[in-house]
DNA sequence: ATTTGCCAACCTGTATGCAGCTATGGTGTG
DNA sequence: CACACCATAGCTGCATACAGGTTGGCAAAT
């Protein structure tokens, strides 16, 4: 199949290749809001696009539903779920706790690799200034998440951290446009702070930094919601 | 199919009926060790048993794999995953943290219902003394888990709590036979303590009680592992 | 006797046909 | 003109046929 499709995406438990490729592609589209909430997806349509039959597409859609990103109804189709404010609040509160927990299971030997990744991301971030390229920005966050995720030595926490990152990122992305410059500056700060923590080998600090910036984003989203 | 199969099992995000029934049946068999680790399951065989085609069976098996309970390899079959000691330690450590977190998201209005459930479980537990009925004992733990799970007001935490309960229960069950009387007494204590906490409306205490008894079980499993 | 190569049976992954369900637009009636 | 009903198109859920992959055993060569 894909020549280099499964590159820097995480492989916590690498399942089948083809289905997973479709799953990740659709997941990213949903999180990028290219598939906005409420949009109806057809299995036949997707099968044509990926040049496969309906079967693998169905498998991918079932995984998405299991992740809470879509909802499939018989006779209708698979629609992207909306952003339930309650679920949103729960997910963010939970993510705060998860990040705080990160320092209790540090994978110290991963710190150097993470640091070099962070430095690369810093360069790419400065190249991004003034472009307002949402997708590149999200991709950057995506890779930051993976880099920090590898710093967690506990498999269960790592899986959960990953799972709710995607659910949260989708919601967060829907309001980011109004705060693009702020988020850009915030991400620059976060990268700086994380780089410093990694140089000191202090993974617990990385978790707290992440926790704080999640809280910052949460605050912005909350104020946007109350404003609207 | 099952006439009353979807009774007191949780419906965090109720998916399709038929597939979910098969999924729960297989999950319980795996957690009860009726399907021991390493056992090979055939799709055709299961399809015959449940009087359906391979398709819904495959969906259930994929969800089990996603939960980490099975592993499917092309040309071979679906085998029940073994108990990786590392994963075991990670899951237990993570569950400790989750239980401690429970009190931060208390669903106070659920406390009375939980209390009445606990009282029923206490009666059923005394009726269980001296019988060494593993399956009934596990069912009891199962229902205790659901009762306490409903006390969590945060959806994300509730889902995660549920998810890793099943992964842990399977491992824990594999060594329980050696400590049956101890676990029985321990469960009686846990029920008493939880009942007291619920009478006081102190859900945070419920979380800590649960955390402690998870730690007790962990200690027993660990000592058993080192002994073997 | 041991090793190596091959083949056949079996299992999963994929594609496709069919049945059941849902939504929508058109039509007939009040 | 408004409303209710029905037919129809399109979708998902399920069953099944086919293709690709793996394993174990048998046979032949060393």
Image: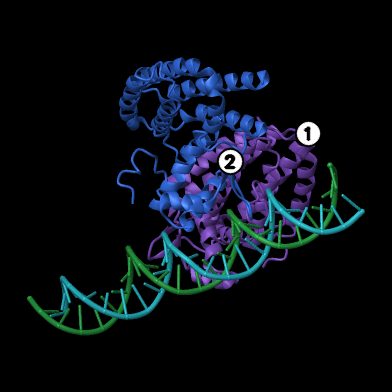
Chain colours: A blue, B purple, C cyan, D green
Q: Nearer the viewer, residue A69 or A35?
A: A35
Q: Which of D29 and B47 is in front in this view?
A: B47
Label 2 crowd (10 A; few <14 / some 14-19 / many >=20): some
- Per the image, label 1 sits on a secondary structure element best described as loop
Q: Nearer the viewer, residue B112 or A188?
A: A188
Q: Mark 1 lies on which chain?
A: B
| Coordinates of residue B149 in the picture (x, y in percent) | 67, 43
Q: Which quadrant holds residue B100? A: top right
Q: Can residue B226 be seen in this view?
A: no
- The answer to whether C19 appears left or right of A202 in the picture is right
- The answer to whether A149 appears left or right of A172 in the picture is left
| Coordinates of residue C14 in the picture (x, y in percent) | 42, 60
- The answer to whether B142 appears left or right of A65 in the picture is right
- Per the image, label 2 sits on a secondary structure element best described as loop
User: How many numbered markers are drawn?
Assistant: 2
Vertical relation: A136 (above or below) B214: above
Vertical relation: B142 (above or below) B205: below
Residue at 31%, 27% in the rendered image: A112
Residue at 67%, 20% in the rendered image: A226
| Coordinates of residue B168 in the picture (x, y in percent) | 54, 49
Vertical relation: A213 (above or below) A167: above
Vertical relation: B183 (above or below) B150: below
Q: Is residue A180 visible?
A: yes
**Residue bearing mark 1:** B200
**Residue bearing mark 2:** A39
């Amino acid at each position: 199949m894909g020549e280099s499709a499964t590159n820097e995406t995480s492989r916590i438990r690498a399942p089948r290749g083809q289905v997973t490729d479709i799953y990740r592609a659709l997941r990213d589209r949903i999180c990028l809001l290219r598939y906005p909430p409420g949009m109806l997806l057809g299995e036949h349509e997707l099968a044509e696009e990926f040049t496969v039959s309906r079967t693998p597409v169905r498998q991918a859609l079932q995984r998405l539903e299991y992740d809470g990103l879509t909802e499939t109804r018989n006779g209708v189709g698979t629609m992207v779920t909306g952003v339930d404010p309650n679920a949103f609040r729960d997910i963010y509160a939970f993510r705060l706790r998860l990040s705080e927990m990160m320092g209790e299971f540090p994978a110290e030997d991963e710190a150097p690799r993470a640091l070099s990744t962070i430095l690369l991301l810093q360069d790419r971030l400065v190249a991004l200034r003034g472009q307002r390229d949402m997708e590149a920005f999200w991709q950057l966050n995506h890779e930051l998440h993976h880099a920090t995720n590898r710093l967690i030595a506990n498999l269960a926490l790592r899986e959960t951290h990953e799972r709710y990152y995607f659910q949260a990122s989708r919601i967060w992305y829907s309001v980011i446009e109004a705060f693009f410059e702020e988020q850009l500056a915030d991400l620059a700060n976060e990268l700086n702070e994380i780089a410093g923590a990694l140089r000191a080998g202090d993974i617990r600090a990385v978790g707290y930094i992440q926790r704080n910036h999640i809280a910052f984003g949460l605050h912005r989203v909350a104020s946007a919601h109350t404003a609207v």
